[in-house]
Amino acid sequence: AQSVTQPDIHITVSEGASLELRCNYSYGATPYLFWYVQSPGQGLQLLLKYFSGDTLVQGIKGFEAEFKRSQSSFNLRKPSVHWSDAAEYFCAVGGMEYGNKLVFGAGTILRVKS
Amino acid sequence: DAGVTQSPTHLIKTRGQHVTLRCSPISGHKSVSWYQQVLGQGPQFIFQYYEKEERGRGNFPDRFSARQFPNYSSELNVNALLLGDSALYLCASSLPDDEKLFFGSGTQLSVL
């Protein structure tokens, strides 16, 4: 069965500092991997996705993520965080045979201090 | 272009009541999925509909049902509400055979 673990419930970084949010997944075949961001009271916005090919994927708002099959990880990174990046971030896994059924992690709340 | 729209935005019900949540997908999207997000957790898959047919169902009781209309809009119905049904209910739409989901802002359901 699919599962996603986001080990960090909260992360606080200073504005301008680099960011890495961790995501580990469990999936039997080649996964489809996603990162979504959610601001308070809002729906989820897709930051980036990995289906196949280059393991380093670029997304919106300056985010990138690297797929590492050997570590079952898909960590999200940003070189310089802006105060507007404060939100909750969700990693999700899906697969071709599961259609639109995504399994989400519990989320990581990012706080940005000035 | 309008995104995924959901109504109502907020809803308060009491235990045992019934609720209907509505979703309009992005124009051209024929697939609609429903997710439940309990406070402090990630979204959980409830249903997926495509061309008015149920394509997938998550681990939810039969009190939860949904349908999709010819214009691809969708309704999620929950009967005999329990306190534990209090959550943000998210609707997402997508193009056929595309796993990229576009989410609405959700309906916040409170069951008292």
Image (cartoon, coloured by chain):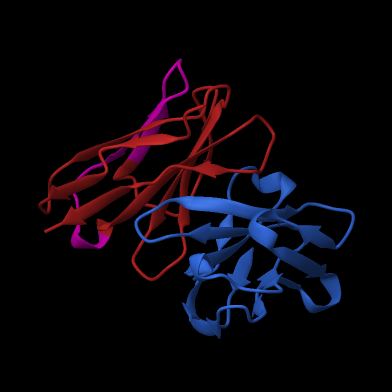
Chain colours: A blue, B red
- The residue depicted at 60 percent of the width and 51 percent of the height is A46
Is A32 left, or right, of A3 in this rendering?
A: right
Q: Quadrant of the N terminus of chain A?
A: bottom right
Task: Give the image location of residue A18, x and y in percent.
Answer: 67, 79
Span colored in magenta: B65-84
Q: Quadrant of residue B87?
A: bottom left
Farthest right residue in view: A53
- The residue depicted at 36 percent of the width and 46 percent of the height is B106
Task: Give the image location of residue A7, x and y in percent.
Answer: 57, 82
Q: Can residue B88 be seen in this view?
A: yes
Farthest top residue in view: B70
Residue B20 lies, with reference to residue A94, above or below; the image says above
Q: Which of A58 and B50 is in front in this view?
A: A58
Is A106 left, or right, of A62 in this rendering?
A: left
Is A92 left, or right, of B40 in this rendering?
A: right
Instruction: Confirm whether the magenta stretch covers residue B81.
Output: yes
Q: Nearer the viewer, residue A41 or A27?
A: A41
- The residue depicted at 47 percent of the width and 22 percent of the height is B72
Task: Give the image location of residue B105, x and y in percent.
Answer: 39, 46
